[in-house]
Amino acid sequence: MNAILDNPIYHALTTNHVCFSNGDENIKYYHREVASFAGMKTYTEADFLKLYEHLPDNGVFIVFSPEVLTIPEPWKLIRKIDMFQFIYEHNFVPEQQLEIDLEDLNQEHVGEMIALVELTKPGPFLPKTIDLSNYTGVFENGRLAAMAGHRFHSRHYIEVSAVCSHPDFLGKGYAYAVIREQVKRIFEKSQIPFLHVRQDNVGAIKLYEKLGFNIRTKMQAYVLAK
């Protein structure tokens, strides 16, 4: 487990998400319209330089590591984000608390999804991020009030991601409901749920612990540009 979840992006792009993968044996990155994430086999200076050569535009790559990395030139470090990696190690789905109607989200909802992500900032969401699958949401009065979906699929681990709730609809149990639905769907695939959260996001951490997730390790995200 350690090798896979310590390097979840690289393992996703060399296994279950190979269909979204660019790069070579040592460096991998998602199709640009799907996600900005990249992974490396060893995170050596040589791998960093090779990844630099692959950045196809003036955008960014985001890499994860449980270890503090030294970012070599000519990369420019835009931001370092301190996170926790949580894992769900139980053999049951969290208890349902409220009867909340959930709706599968599709390409027609992408505009609303991007707007909600830009408002709440759980992490990047691009026009084809929805292709990573299983996005569900809660609507109230025709507005997208909360959502979550799948992101990295690293062997038998699936990440819950894009968890966000509109500030107009907080305190209604919507975030709990969409995360519980993700855990349920991951179990239906006989996979193990995990997720990432900023260390300063106290409210989200409390919610994940309430659902039964436990901290596995600290994780850093590095936002890199040319």
Image: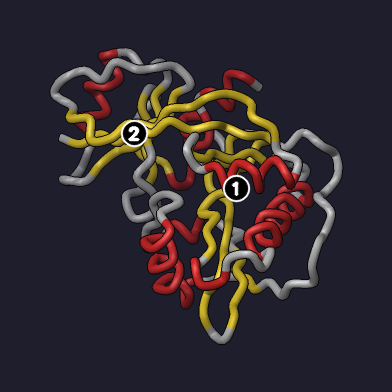
**10 Å neighbourhood of mark 1: few (<14), some, or many (≥20)?**
many
- State the residue at coordinates (28%, 35%): 79
Q: Quadrant of residue 180?
A: bottom right
Is 222 on the left-hand or right-hand side of 196? left
22 lies above or below 180: above
Residue depicted at 30% across the width and 38% down the height: 61
Compared with residue 207, is residue 4 higher up or lower down, i.e. above or below?
above
Q: Which residue is mark 1?
A: 160
Where residue 168 appears, as percent x and y from the top left, is 51, 72
Q: Amino acid at mark 2?
A: Gly
Q: Position of residue 69 (x, y in %)?
A: 35, 17
* Residue 78 can be seen in this image: yes
Q: Can residue 192 be seen here?
A: no
Among the two numbered marks 1 and 2 on one chain, the one whose residue lies closer to the N terminus? 2
Task: Count the labels in the image.
Answer: 2
Relative placement, left or right, of 225 versus 205 is left
Q: Which numbered circle lies on residue 190?
A: none
- Label 2: which residue? 23
Coordinates of residue 184 in the picture (x, y in percent): 76, 53
Measured Cα–Cα span from mark 1 to mark 2: 25 Å
